[in-house]
Amino acid sequence: MTTTDWSEACDCHVHVYEPGYPLAPTATFQPPHAPASAYREVQRALGIGRVVVVQPTGYGFDNRCTLAAIAELGAGARGVAVIRPDTPEAELHRLHAAGIRGVRYMMLPGGVLPWDGLEETAARIAPLGWHINLQLDGRTLPEHEQRLRQLPGRLVIDHVAKFLGPVTVADEAFASLRRLLDAGHCWIKLSAPYESSRSGPPHYADVAALVRELARAHPERGLWASNWPHPNVLPRPSDGDLLEWARGLMGAESAQRRILVDNPAALYGF
C-alpha cells in the first residue's frame, strides 16, 4: 500500500469456499476453489490484518464453512452469517462467540431471506451489536428508504449500493443512499466496482464518481472490501489494484485511515 503501517486495515467482504461443504438447492453457480489459506496470502500481499468473511449465497443457511474460515483466520477475522428467523437465542450467542457480527440479506438471485423478515431479524440482533448486511439493486433504495431508516440497530450496504444501471451523484437513488448514511446507523462498502460499472476497468469512472463523493461527504460511514475471490468475474481483477483504486478516491490519509481502519474496528468489534 505505502510505507505507512496498514496492518489494522480491514477487508470487509470476502467469501470462502472449501471442499466438503455442500451447496444449497438455491445456489445459482458453482463457486471457485477459494480456501481460507488462499485468502491469507492475499492479506499478506495487501499488508492488511483484518477481514470479514461474508456467508456466500451458495451455502444458504449452512454457515459451517464461514465459521471455519473465521476460526482459521484468527483474531483478526469476523463474519456475517445467514440465519433463519426462528434461530434460538442460544445459537445467536454461540455465533457471536465465534465471531459473527451481522446477518446477510441478499435481495438479488441466490438470496434466501425475504424482505418481510427484515425488521424482526434486525430487532433480534440489535442487542448483540450486529448489523443487517444488505445487498440490493441500489436503484430501488428510494422505495425501501423509509423502512431501512427505521430499522433497529445497524445497517451495512454492499458494493457502493450496486446500482444495476447508470446512476450519477445527482440521481434520486444516490440521494436516498446519502440520506441513509446521514441518519447515522448505516455504512456503505466502497467495493467491487466491477459489479455495476458500465465504463469498466481499470478506472471504473462511473462508479469512481460515486465513491469519491461518498468518501468526501461521508468518511465516517465508509468501509472498504475486496470481494475476493470475485465470483463469476473474468478476468479476475487484482486485489492490489482494487485497493489502490479505492484509496486514490478516498483522499487524504486521515480519510483513508478512517475508512480502512477506524470504521470497521468500531463496527465489527476489533
Image (cartoon, rainbow, N blue to C red):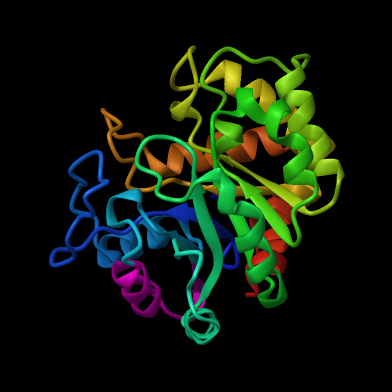
Question: Does residue 73 belong to the magenta stretch?
Answer: yes
Left or right side of 13 for 73: left
Tell me where the magenta segment starts and ends, as one range: 63-79
Q: Is 225 a magenta residue?
A: no
Give the answer, above or below, for where 141 lies relative to 48: above
Q: How many marks?
A: 0
Residue found 48% across the figure and 13% down from its top: 198
Task: Specify the quadrant of the image occupied by residue 205.
Answer: top right
> Residue 112: x percent and y percent?
40, 49
Image location (x, y in percent) of residue 78: 51, 70
Determine which quarter of the picture holds residue 212: top right
> Who is closer to the viewer here, 46 or 133?
133
Work out whether 25 lies above or below 36: above
Measuring 74% from the left and 15% from the top, which residue is drawn there? 171
Residue for point 32% across, 75% down? 68
The picture places residue 109, in percent across and down from the top left corner, at 37, 35
Task: Report if residue 2 is visible in the image.
Answer: no
Measuring from the top left, give residue 158's x and y in whole percent.
Answer: 56, 42
Q: Is residue 236 left or right of residue 204?
A: left
Give me the residue at 44% from left, 27% from top: 194
Q: Which quadrant of the rendered structure holds the C terminus?
A: bottom right
Q: In the picture provided, is 18 more to the left or to the right than 187?
A: left
Whether residue 182 is situated above or below residue 175 in the rendered picture: below
